Image: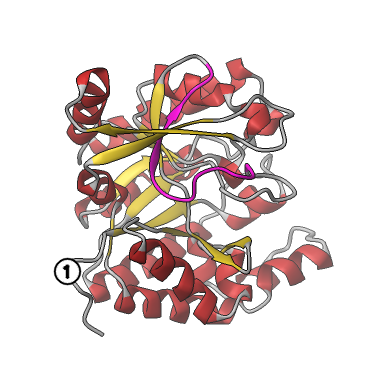
Amino acid sequence: MTVAAAEPPNAVTVDVEDWLQSVVDPALPVTDRFRGNTRKLLEAFAARGVRGTFFVLGLAAEKAPDLVREIQQAGHEVQSHGYGHRLITSLTPEEFRADVVRSKKLLEDLTGHEVCGYRAPAFTITLQTLWALDILAEAGFRYDSSVFPIRMPRYGIRGAPHFPHKLKTPGGAEIVEIPVASYRLAGRRIPTGGGGYFRLLPYPLLRGGIRQLNDAGHSATIYMHPYEFAPGEIGTFDHPVRLKTRLHQGLCRGAFAGRVQRLLSEFRFGPVRDVIASIDRWPVHTHAAAGADVTQLSFGSVARGAGAAGDADKSIQECRQ
């Protein structure tokens, strides 16, 4: 299928992590399995001529610095997934700051380029952890992709914008927010951006989430993990894993890679930096305080080059690899 050049660029993103350490127990050491799984992703992207954004876990980067350089040399954007894959909801502000600063420095030392993007483990920037956005801004991050625009049991903010926007932090700073794709159907918003949703939902819903955003003039962002390209991996671990986890994480995993390839053939995808570069006017959003039912829908459209907002846009554009 030929993708129309006039369509907004969409972002394809990868959270580079190890399944056992990230999903089962963050206290476990990172295994070597993510190396081969990540290379499967690199091969899949290369086959389509697609470049993406890889949010690399610090522990994974320490385990496989050669892989980080390989990702970069293939033309992909290398950004931060934090250091230890500890959920922000379990961290103090001081612990979170130490985690992201450590990860940022590690990746910058490995790549020789500034790291300016971040995605939280399990999307755990919520109404209760909005303080993390101020820490990200203070640490030099220009964009975040952690606010899930649907309220789920462990993460998400109901009523959050479902398209790229600028976010006012509780401390008054601004940071670009790149939410993952979702689909509005029958008055409800359905998560269709990646992960388990790619495995379990009908393919027309996945395609529909991207098409709906693109038809409205917005870029869509999808995400995946290297282990989702290894359908038989879950059954090979010696470490005890609950049957419920095995079933939930393994169901329909064999179809994952094919669905990703199909989406890559039907839509225009690239790294997050291409999405940011394509936006001329940024809607600005402010979330309500923790405990409120919905976020404050107070938007203001800010044009690139307009005062302090323009300076922020220039800062984002300079963060390129």
Give the class, few, some or many, for how many residues have Cα within 10 Å of label 1's Cα (few <14, many ≥20). Answer: few
Label 1 belongs to which residue? 5
Furthest-bottom residue in this view: 1
Side (left or right) of 155 relative to 267:
right
Q: Which residues are magenta?
A: 157-170
**Quadrant position of the N terminus in the picture:** bottom left
Query: Does the rendering let one see residue 232?
Result: no
Q: Is residue 298 above or below residue 227?
A: above
Note whether residue 264 is visible. yes
- Of 266 and 258, nearer the camera is 266
Residue at point 23%, 30% (across, down): 313
Q: Nearer the viewer, residue 19 or 114?
A: 114
Give 171 or 27, whichever is nearer the viewer.
171
Above or below, 142 against 45 in this view is above
**Residue 238 occupies which quadrant of the picture?**
bottom right
Magenta stretch holds residue 248: no
Identify whether 305 is placed above or below 21.
Answer: above
Q: Can you give x and y, in whole percent of width and height, for residue 35 in the image?
A: 43, 58
